[in-house]
């Protein structure tokens, strides 16, 4: 007579599938992350994006459980994208995936609403652990931050130059630093050229800058774009 199945095994709830979106402008990075995600039974990559605007559209359309977001993604960087995801798809947990590890960047993405922060150099060892944590609705951080520091970062007032800019101003700084003209920025953001010029003028005044070259240097220095 065959032994009956252990009721404790059958009573365990099935692991919920985890649906993931990958937003990174490097194809080789997306392929590597996809390989890791799909190595786990029940996990799937539902969408991939090469820039922030495309990523936001795909998050809204596919509603993934987790969005893995490269901080330096073009058009709308990781912090800006995180703010939009939190507002428009609050069920999606954001994991910031970045080459950089600085106090300014960490504070910015935490304030934006990211639930995880992973330095790319740590990915081989910790990507699965990070995704596991976010799938359980728990935060996960590597680099200079840990759970003990999380509340401290969020409770302290920001002291960087970037904290003086509005989210829209940061979007425009990124687009200009990436080589877009004001006209191109207005098309990408779907706002008027006059509005772009107003924001651009405000940024230059706030940061005491006088040339586009100085604005680009500011964007690189503050990790808004990569050099």
Image: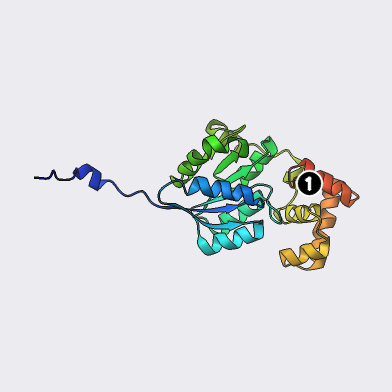
In this view, the residue farthest toward the right is 210
Q: Is residue 224 left or right of residue 48?
A: right
| Coordinates of residue 41 in the picture (x, y in percent) | 40, 48
The reply to whether residue 94 is in sight is no
Q: Secondary structure at mark 1?
A: helix
Q: Quadrant of the N terminus?
A: top left
| Coordinates of residue 212 in the picture (x, y in percent) | 87, 52
Instruction: Characterize the local packing of mark 1: few (<14), some (14-19) or many (20 or more) Cα atoms within 10 angstroms.
Output: many
The residue identified by callout 1 is: 219
Quadrant location of residue 154?
Answer: top right
User: Closer to the camera, 3 or 226?
Assistant: 3
In this view, the residue farthest toward the left is 1
How many dots with numbers? Answer: 1
The residue lying at 83 percent from left, 44 percent from top is 217
The residue lying at 64 percent from left, 36 percent from top is 156
Q: Quadrant of the C terminus?
A: top right
| Coordinates of residue 183 in the picture (x, y in percent) | 82, 65
Measured along the vertical axis of the image, is residue 184 above or below residue 118?
Answer: below
| Coordinates of residue 109 in the picture (x, y in percent) | 63, 44
The residue lying at 53 percent from left, 50 percent from top is 34
| Colouring rule applied to residues | rainbow
Measured along the vertical axis of the image, is residue 176 above or below residue 109?
Answer: below
The reply to whether residue 57 is in sight is yes
Q: Is residue 53 left or right of residue 211?
A: left
Quadrant location of residue 3?
Answer: top left
The residue lying at 14 percent from left, 45 percent from top is 4
Measured along the vertical axis of the image, is residue 184 above or below residue 33?
Answer: below
């Amino acid at each position: 007579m065959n032994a009956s199945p252990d009721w404790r095994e059958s009573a365990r709830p099935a692991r919920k599938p985890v649906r993931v979106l990958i937003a990174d402008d490097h194809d080789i990075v997306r392929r590597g992350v996809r390989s890791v995600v799909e190595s786990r039974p029940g996990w799937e990559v539902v969408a991939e994006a090469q820039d922030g605007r495309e990523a936001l559209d795909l998050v809204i359309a596919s509603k993934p459980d987790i969005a893995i977001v490269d901080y330096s993604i073009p058009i709308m960087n990781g912090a800006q994208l995180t703010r939009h995801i939190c507002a428009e798809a609050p069920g999606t947990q954001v994991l910031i995936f970045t080459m950089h590890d600085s106090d300014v960047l960490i504070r910015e993405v935490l304030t934006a609403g990211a639930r995880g922060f992973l330095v790319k150099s740590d990915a081989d060892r910790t990507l699965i652990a990070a995704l596991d944590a976010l799938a359980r609705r728990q935060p996960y951080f590597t680099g200079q931050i840990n759970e003990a520091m999380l509340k401290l970062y969020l409770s302290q007032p920001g002291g960087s130059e970037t904290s003086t800019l509005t989210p829209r101003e940061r979007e425009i700084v990124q687009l200009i630093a990436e080589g877009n003209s004001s006209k191109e920025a207005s098309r990408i953001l779907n706002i008027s050229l006059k509005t772009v010029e107003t924001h651009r003028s405000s940024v230059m005044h706030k940061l005491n800058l006088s040339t586009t070259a100085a604005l680009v240097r500011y964007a690189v220095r503050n990790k808004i774009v990569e050099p």
